[in-house]
Amino acid sequence: MGLFDRHAGLLDAYRDVRTTGADPFQIRMERVLSATEAVINGRKTLLVGTNNYFGLTFDPSCMEAAIEAIRAEGTGTTGSRIANGSYSEHVALEQEIAEFYGKKHCMVFTTGYQANLGVISTLVAQGDFLLIDADSHASIYDACKMTQAEVVRFKHNDPSSLEARLRRLGDRPGNRLVVLEGIYSMLGDSAPLKEFIDVSKKYGAYVLVDEAHSLGALGEHGRGLCESTGVLDDCHFIVGTFSKTLGAIGGYCVSNDPDFDILRVTVRSYMFTASLPPSIVASVRQALRVVKARPELRTKLWENVATLYDGLAARGFKLGPEHGPVVGVHLPDRSTAIGFWRAMLDAGVYVNVAVPPATPNGVSLLRCSVSAAHSKEQLAHMIEVMTGIGRQMGLLGPQLRAVAGNR
C-alpha cells in the first residue's frame, strides 16, 4: 500500500482540475501592488479573495512599525517563548489585546490555527465533552483529533440542536465546552450567539468563540460578534487571528479565567513553536491602534459589503444567507465553480473557489472577501465581470435566484 493510496479519490479529482487549466489552489502572485491589486499571470488583477478586510497590509503606519522593529530587534526570535523568552513587544501586545476586549488575560500564538488547535485541545480532556458546530473551521476539527474529550456535533447555527445535545448528556460528569464562530468563513453567515449563550448557561457549559473573520468588522469598537450581540462578558474564551483585519499573521486567546496562565505551560502549539518575529508584533500593535482610531474603516467595509452583495443578488446570483465581509456565491457543482473561477481570473479578477470536501453540505462556491480598501468602481467592475461570465455559462436563471439576507 502506498502512502497516498488513502487519498486516491481526491488525487483523481485534483488531477482533473490541473489538466483542464490553471490550478486554483496554487496561484502565484508575481507581485502584490496594493491591498486590492496584484500581478497574476503577467496582468494586473483585482483581489477580492484575500480576507484583507481593512486593507491594512499596505497601511503606511503598520509598514513603518514593522521596518523599525526589524532594524531594532532583527528578523526573528529563533525559538519559542518558553525556550528563548518573551520580547517586550510580545508582552505589550498581549496587554493591549486584553485591554481591547476588556479581559484580564491574553496569549499570543504564531498563527490563528495554532491558537484554536492548542487552546481547544488543552481545555478539555478525557471525561469532558466538546460540542462544535457542524460547519466549524478545519482548525477546530483538528483540535478535536488532539483531545480525548468526547466530541459532539450540533447542527449549524441551530441553538435548539445544541440544547438537544446538552440535554442528552444529562448528569454525566465532565466539563462541557461549546465552540462557536463569529462569522463562518465559507458562507459568511454569523452565529445566533445570544441564543447559544443562553443555552450554554442553562446547562452550565463553557463557551469559546472564534472571531477570526469578525474582529474589526462587527461591534461598536470592532470587538466582533461577542460585542455586537452584547455577550462579551459571557464568553469564557475568545480566539482570533491577526491574518484578516489586522493584515499580518498570528493568533490570540483572551479570557477572564483566573487560572488562564497555566495554558502557557500546557498548550503545546504555544510551547513548541517559534514566537512571532518583532516586525509582525509591531505591525499588529499598530494595526490594532488603527482599528480603534478609525471606525470609518468599519463603515466603509459595510458600505462595500452592501455594494457587492446587493449588486450580485440583483443580477440573479444565489448568495450566502446574510450580508457580511465574506460573500459566498453558490454554483451548481465543482466543475462549474472551477470553470467560473478560471474565467474570472482570465478577466483580471481573483476570488477563491471552494469545493467539497472543504465546504459545508457539499456546496460549490466562489468565495469573495470584501475590503474597506476596495473602491466602488472596483466592485462595480467585478459585478459586471461576474454577470458577463454567468450569462455566457448559462447560469443566470431560476437555479441561481438570490437568497434574501439581512445586514
Image: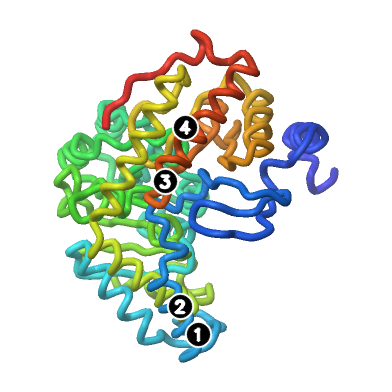
Residue 375, label in figure = 3
Mark 1 closeness class: few <14, some 14–19, many ≥20 residues within 10 Å = some
Give the residue furthest to the top: 398
The quadrant of the picture occupied by the N terminus is top right
Residue 73 vs residue 181, the one in the foreground: 73
Q: Nearer the viewer, mark 1 or mark 3?
A: 3
Q: Is residue 134 visible?
A: no
The correct choice, above or below, for 263 with respect to 307 in the image is below
Quarter containing the C terminus: top left
In this figure, which residue is indicated by the disc labeled 2?
66
How packed mark 4 is, by other alpha carbons closer than 10 Å (few <14, some 14-19, many 20 or more), is many
Q: Is residue 190 visible?
A: yes
- Marks 2 and 1, how far apart at CA: 6 Å
Q: Earlier in the sequence, mark 2 or mark 3?
A: 2
The amino acid sitting under disc 2 is Ala
* Numbered disc 2: secondary structure: helix
Residue 298: mark: none
SS class, disc 3: loop
CA distance for labels 1 and 3 = 32 Å
How many marks do you count on the picture? 4
Q: Earlier in the sequence, mark 4 or mark 2?
A: 2
Identify the residue under disc 1: 70
Which residue is label 4 attached to? 328
Q: Position of residue 234 (x, y in %)?
A: 17, 50
Say what secondary structure mark 4 lies in.
strand
- In whole angstroms, how far apart are the C-alphas of marks 4 and 2? 33 Å
